[in-house]
Image (cartoon, rainbow, N blue to C red):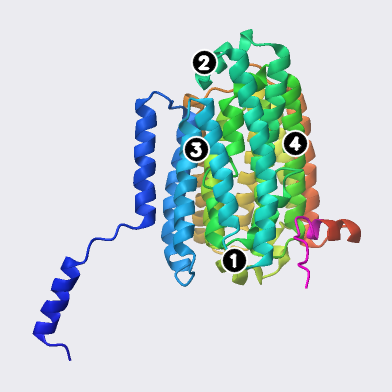
Amino acid sequence: MATTFDMVQTGAAQAKRPLRVTAPVLALSAMALGLGATAIAGLLRVTAAGVALGGLAALLTGLVLVFAQRHLRADPRRLAHARLATGLAFATVLVGLADNVVLLAAGWIAAGRLMTGLVRHAGDWAEARAAAARAGTAFLIGDIALVGALVTLAITAKTASIAAIAAAVPTLSPLALTLAAALLVIAAAARCATPPFSSWLLSSIAAPTPVSALMHAGFVNAGGFLVIHFAPVLEAVPAARFALLAIGVTGALYGSALMLVRADVKGALAASTVAQMGFMLLTCALGGYAAALWHMVAHGAFKAWLFLGASGAIRRSAAGAGDKALPAPVPALIALAALGAGALIMETAIAQTTLLPLGLAATALLVALAMAARGLRFETARITLLALPALLVAVNAAALALMEAVQANAAVPLLPAWAQLALLSLFLAGWLVQQDLAAGRRRLPAGLHARLLHAGALPTPAN
């Protein structure tokens, strides 16, 4: 048993031991100083989109690092993960606040390299190395596109200030604007993992769970920020907005189809992200920037939470696939109600840019209400559970109103309201098919099922 003298000696030795400053603390301090110096130099600018992106990155990274302390406690690379995660947060904040094209490009490229390192966390595993290589290739294409767009705009506008470039858009060459807008669309699609860049996200599930959560802390959804940030450039080139709309629709439908066949929890969540990023980009293309910005924040926070709790979904999934579907004819009634709501607001001002997002939000509300009411026998419990979706809708409505107060939508809508209603009909038809497939009332063709099941699969390592 230790004596009192031994305890005193031990305490004295510990007091003399120099205070250890961990690498994450040093990195965070250096990044804070760097941001402060950059702000003093006048190279930062506060915007609604930038604050949303940076705030999302800072908040979620802190939460993920707390989660990772326990999740990776036996991992010898846990400190490297903390350093890379901290660096990723700083790079994302820099992207959100930079008013200089060089700083924006530096933050964007650094974020891609850091995420590649995070995906490669289990470097002794062949699948992790292959996933990192695939992600690095997609990021490189996006980086080259972004740098090309920024160089084109800076040279044409004769300024490196992003605010000055936006103000000078009406005076810029149509050819330069078209080239820059096309490159910005490519950069956004690569970062958002929409087709043809979806495979990097689908294969990234080889990384640990905290890495999958970190992707939603302003990284995978940074493509939406980029489009909003350079909205004047894209609004000057309608062809680029139509291209972005096509990419968004394709990503939304493709990701929704992938969700049907993925039995693994993380794979299904990754497929859901592909679909959600498609929805976000098509909302940006339509000009509903406020709705897209709130989608970026809400989806990032919600999906990060789902990834961190992915292990708990194994038990819930055992109840059967039928739990994912509503009994007929409820889905058809919900689709008709959503179309009716869309038709009612067609002539209003808000419908010019956000009819499609609002129609999809109304569908989600009705689905949440139907799921809450299903199978409940006691009136008190039914009222309680029905109040939860209503509260969620109220929160979302308030947040969307706040976003619309600080983030202006496009001055010129891309599509008339009737065309958005037609798109809403397309998505609702796809959702009805998805409900039939989930309930077992319909089956995918075997060939299509196999293709979707192996989408994003990594090559089998050679023996």
Q: Nearer the viewer, mark 4 or mark 1?
A: 4
Neighbourhood count class around disc 3 (C-alpha, 10 Å): few under 14, some 14–19, many 20 upward: many
Magenta stretch secondary structure, dominant: loop
Task: Name which residue type carries label 2.
Answer: Ala
Distance between the Cα atoms at labels 4 and 1?
Answer: 31 Å
Q: Is residue 270 left or right of residue 222?
A: right
Sequence-earlier tag: 2 or 4? 2
Residue beneath disc 1: 313
Q: Evaluate whether residue 422 shows in this view.
A: yes
Q: Nearer the viewer, residue 334 or 46?
A: 46
Q: CA distance from mark 3 to mark 1?
A: 28 Å
Badge 1 crowding class, 10 Å Cα cut-off, few under 14, some 14 to 19, many 20 or more, is: some
Report the residue that reaches farthest toward the left: 5
**Which residue is identified by label 2?**
164
- Residue 403 in the image: state x and y as whole percent: 50, 30
**Residue at 77% of width from left, 43% of height from top?**
196
Q: Are marks 3 and 2 in contact (CB under 8 Å)?
A: no
The kind of residue tagged 4 is Ile
Residue ID for mark 3: 53
Q: Which residues are magenta?
A: 452-463
Residue 319 location (% of width, % of height): 66, 70
Q: Amino acid at mark 3?
A: Leu
Camera-nearest residue between 376 and 306: 306
Q: Is residue 151 above or below residue 310?
A: above
Q: Secondary structure at mark 1?
A: helix
Q: Nearer the viewer, mark 2 or mark 1?
A: 2
Q: Residues within 10 Å of mark 4 (few under 14, many from 20)?
A: many
